[in-house]
Structure formats: structure tokens, C-alpha cells
Amino acid sequence: MLQFTVLLTTAALLLGCTSKEESQLMQDYNANATYHERLQKTEKVQLYEGNVTKAMLTATYLYTQTYEKHDTRDEVFILGVHLEDEVLQTLQEGQYILTLNGSSAKEALRLDKNDERLKELSFIMDWGSYYLVTFPHVKGKDFRLTFKSTSYGEGTLHFAKVAKYVLSKQAF
């Protein structure tokens, strides 16, 4: 009889814990799945002079999972750049260098503020510039995007083609 009472009480507690809010939360998450996936593939780095941010870069990796064994697609990012002291927020000035595992970009296309691709990003800066940057294919599952400044040093962003928790701790 005691076991039956404990079992009945446990069942009542478990049923009472599920709610309409949980199902609404799951509906909201599924409706915004692209946003959340992009958020997981977004990183940010800041370069400082003293305690003042002089350059900030946000990068969203636009990779979609594939089951092809020999995937040789280029690595594509949308980069947001904010340069504190610059009137023109641009990467092409030569003072800033961007590399992926030591390789330079194949192409950097400046995006208009109203570009449709920016609407899918999770982090948008109104005061920055955005670029669609393409790098050569990287064979490994993880890689480093390095943002260097001749004046403020460098920062590194870590990206992976698989979930980061799958990679060994030595990768990062």
C-alpha cells in the first residue's frame, strides 16, 4: 500500500510539472530555430588600448551540416566590424588583418545595412559594418579566425564544424 501511495504521488507531481508554458516555449524555440543555430555559431572579440575597446569583431559561421565525406565547400562568415577611432568602418585599410588558420580571405563583400542575410543574425550592431567573407576550405573540424591590428594587437575566435563539446579540450 505504501508503494502504491508513493507511486501515485510521484505520478501526480510529474504530471503537475508539465505546463502550457513549456509547450509554448518549445513552439517559440522551434519557430526561431535558425536564430538559435546562428547564435551558437557566433563569436565576438574585442581589441583594447588600455581599458578602452578600440576594435570589435563579431563573426557568424554560415556552415550547414552535410553528410558528404569529401565536403570541400569554402568557409563563409558574416563579420560585423566596429572600429572606435575610424570614420569609415572598413577592413580594407590595411591596418587590420583577418586570417583563418593563417590563410587570407578569398573574398570580402561589404553588405548593405538592409541586406536580407543580416536579418537572420543573432547579434547586430547598428554602428558597425558587415561583410560576407569567404575563406578557402579547412579540412579539420575546428579552426581559428584571427583578427589582428597593427595598433591594438590580436584576438582569436574559435569555430567548429561540429558541436564544440564533441571536440577535445586541446582543440581550444
Image: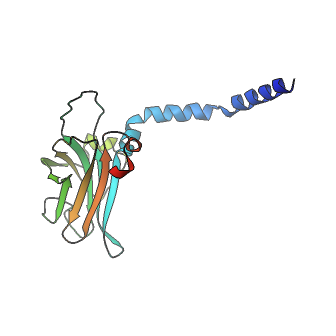
Residue 32 visible (yes or no) = yes
In terms of image quadrants, where is residue 52? bottom left
Judge whether 148 appears above or below 38 on screen.
below
Going by the image, does 79 lie left or right of 16? left
Judge whether 78 appears above or below 16 on screen.
below
Going by the image, does 78 lie left or right of 92? right
| Percent x, y of residue 144 | 26, 52
Identify which residue is drawn at 80% across, 29% down: 6
Rendered-image quadrant of the N terminus: top right
Q: How is the image coloured?
A: rainbow
| Percent x, y of residue 163 | 38, 40
Identify which residue is drawn at 32% across, 59% down: 45
Judge whether 1 appears above or below 147 on screen.
above
Q: Residue furthest right?
A: 1
For this rendering, which residue is in front, 30 or 158? Answer: 158
| Percent x, y of residue 140 | 25, 42
| Percent x, y of residue 19 | 64, 32
Q: How many marks?
A: 0
For this rendering, which residue is in front, 144 or 120? Answer: 144
Residue 124 visible (yes or no) = no
Q: Residue furthest bottom?
A: 50
Identify which residue is drawn at 37% across, 46% down: 168
